[in-house]
Image (spheres, grey):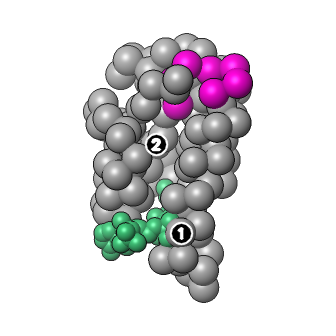
Amino acid sequence: MFSGPLAEYSDRLSLEALGVPADAYYIRELGTDSRFRKQGMCTRAIDELCLHASAAHRTVSVRTREDNVALTSILDKKSFTFIGGCSAETGGAASNRVVYTKALS
Ligand SMILES: CC(C)(COP(=O)(O)OP(=O)(O)OC[C@H]1O[C@@H](n2cnc3c(N)ncnc32)[C@H](O)[C@@H]1OP(=O)(O)O)[C@@H](O)C(=O)NCCC(=O)NCCS
């Protein structure tokens, strides 16, 4: 998992261009070891990160691969909103990413 204030990430400008606020909390990579999947770990991690972020941020943003159906399904259940797609360089190959945001109360 990689997460923190958006300002700490090199891809912040492309996210801001999509409409992610500059002061958002950003979850850039989120994964569960294959041995521990489907036990609610990712769901709890998102809940905990939102709680942590809500102390200092008004928005949380998550980026993931567009074919990560498991994570996009969890984000839908957690009331995140899809805001757009972007591409990312991984190991030299461009791959598509999607970005979701949620307002924190
Ligand atoms: C996405 C991921 C983080 C989910 O982690 P997890 O700890 O298993 O998730 P949880 O147990 O909290 O949630 C399970 C939920 O995932 C969803 N889900 C899991 N597999 C799914 C699938 N094949 N299709 C649709 N939804 C799926 C369901 O909504 C499920 O909820 P349910 O229990 O109500 O059915 C994990 O599958 C993963 O690490 N995938 C690879 C991520 C990756 O490649 N990251 C790097 C690039 S971004």
Q: Residues within 10 Å of mark 2 (few under 14, many from 20)?
A: many
Residue 58 drawn in magenta: yes
Q: Which residue is mark 1?
A: 40
Q: Tell me the quarter of the image containing the N terminus.
A: bottom right
State whether residue 25 is above or below residue 37.
above
Task: Count the labels in the image.
Answer: 2
Q: Which residue is mark 2?
A: 63
Q: Quadrant of residue 18?
A: top left
The residue tagged with tag 1: helix, strand or loop? loop
Q: Which of the labelled discs sits on residue 15, or is there none?
A: none
Where is residue 35 drawn, in percent x and y?
60, 85
Where is residue 39 drawn, in percent x and y?
54, 76
Q: Residue furthest bottom?
A: 35
**Residue at left 65%, top 47%?**
48
Magenta region, residue range: 54-60
Q: Amino acid at mark 2?
A: Arg
